[in-house]
Amino acid sequence: MDTPTTYFHWGFILISTPNLLVIGGMIVLFAIALFAPFPHAEEGEDGGRK
């Protein structure tokens, strides 16, 4: 915390490396949430939920 952070410079985008890592982590977590299977209730004999 005593030293200045490094910055990622790409075209007109200038962002600090820690902020870039946080944003990348949020995107990865969002992608996992999209593709992770959700628990489903078991179906009854008529195909409906119990």
Image (tube, helix red, strand yellow):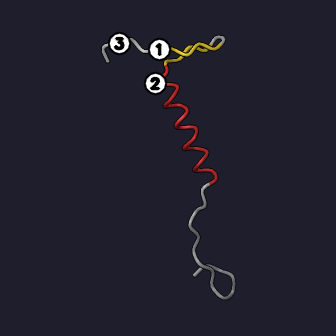
Along the line of sight, the residue nearer the viewer: 38 or 28: 28
Name the residue at 53% across, 31% down: 23
Q: Which residue is mark 1?
A: 6
Determine whether the residue tagged by mark 3 lies in a helix, strand or loop.
Answer: loop
Q: Which residue is mark 2?
A: 18
For this orientation, the residue located farthest to the bottom is 45
Determine whether the residue tagged by mark 1 lies in a helix, strand or loop.
Answer: loop
* Relative vertical location of residue 39 with respect to residue 4 in this rendering, above or below: below
Question: Residue 9: which quarter of the image?
Answer: top right
Query: Which numbered marker is on residue 49?
Result: none
Could you give the CA–CA distance between mark 1 and mark 3, rounded to whole angstroms? 9 Å
Which of discs 3 and 2 lies nearer the camera? The answer is 3
- Residue 16 percent location from the top left of the image: 49, 18
Name the residue at 63% across, 80% down: 43
* Relative vertical location of residue 2 with respect to residue 46 in this rendering, above or below: above
The amino acid pointed to by label 2 is: Pro
Q: Which residue is mark 3?
A: 3
